[in-house]
Amino acid sequence: MRIKSYLLLSLILTCNICKSQQNNISVIAYYTGGDNIDSFAVDKLTHIIFSFCHLKGNRLNVRNARDTAEIQRLVALKQKYPALKVMLSIGGWGGCGPCSEVFSSKKARREFAKSTKELNDYFNTDGLDLDWEYPAIEGFPGHAFVPADKENFTALVKVLRKKLGKNNEISFAAGGFESYIDNSIEWKKVMPKVDRVNLMSYDLVSGNSTVTGHHTPLYSTQQNPESVDKGVKLLEQAGVPANKIVIGAAFYARMWENVKDTLDGLYLEGRFKAGISRRNFETVLSVDSGFVYHWDSIAQAPFLYNSQKQLFVTYDNDKSIALKTQYTIDHNLGGIMFWQLRDDAYEDGLLKAIDDVKVGYKKK
């Protein structure tokens, strides 16, 4: 009887450990500051990435005193949440203009790595997220890019890892579309040196598009080929370990105007109008305002259409966020990240939807 009891206890403990490991995914928030950070459920996060630092000459630079104070507030959270990681980031859309030129130089890469180490030591932050949009392919209009960026990105990561050592984390934000995955990164050389790749599987239908679509779908459709699932599969085909892939979710909507009243506005011509934070969905995108909810069962993505005002909206909601989190667990991925924390509602927001699945979901 004693042996049976011991075996039963061992089995229960083993199951609990497996369940804990199974849902031990990273939940990563990009955060630009400007809000009371205590208004958000920081306890549901594993990482906060301060967005953004920039290049000043060849050095990583915090822009001003406000950003310095913001970083210090984030780091202070680690006293209450010791497991929380706070990372700096560089770049962003429109924020990496000199990156191609600077990172083409061995001397400049070394100086950058040295300054990154100094800033991490000064703030007691936990590493760096590279958000260069994009190496070797066109990104922000007017920003330089050359084919050699691909090899230079590898060299940059190597010198960063050498300078930061094993205790600081390194990640990078990757375009969630095929041309980036195929052309921007030497995956087999880069991934052994970094902790994760944050797949920007949002804005897959960009503001430059004159045709509506899902900007952050879980699965591809014939009209909407880019998706979370496609990006993950391409990364795995390129040799990226699943446990280093973090998929992206959008805490904001994208709206198109002048969209004709057919097919509920999906895959039709229109003009990009605006982005809308999750915190404003209930007021700006309400039923009372004329918006009708739709669900695409193939893309596993929601959308809204306002026939009176000819407005089309693509976004993530609780359901699509839950499905993305389930996908992350089922496919043994490293985690889920999102742009950005200050877009979320203070109560019952999309971060809660992630956490509900992380805590309660059982892998198939």
Image (cartoon, rainbow, N blue to C red):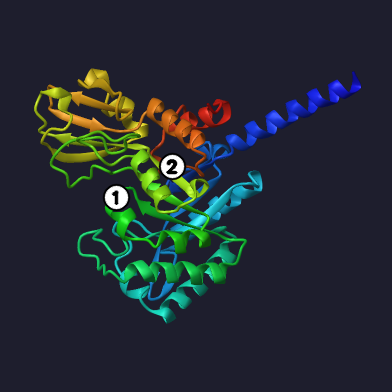
Q: Amino acid at mark 1?
A: Glu
The residue that disc 1 covers is 178
As helix, strand or loop, the secondary structure at mark 2 comes to helix
| Residue 340 horizontal/vertical position (percent) | 40, 43
Q: Nearer the viewer, residue 154 or 29?
A: 154
Q: Amino acid at mark 2?
A: Leu
- From the viewer's perspective, tell me whether residue 172 is left or right of residue 140: right
Task: Say above or below: 64 vs 258.
Answer: below
Task: Say above or below: 160 vs 73.
Answer: below
Within 10 Å of disc 1 (Cα), the crowding (few <14, some 14-19, many 20+) is some
The residue that disc 2 covers is 341
Asked whether residue 217 appears in the rendered view, the answer is yes
Q: Nearer the viewer, residue 287 or 108?
A: 108
Please report the residue visible at 35 percent of the width from the left and 75 percent of the height from the top: 104
Q: Which mark is residue 78?
A: none
Please report the residue visible at 40 percent of the width from the left and 44 percent of the height from the top: 232
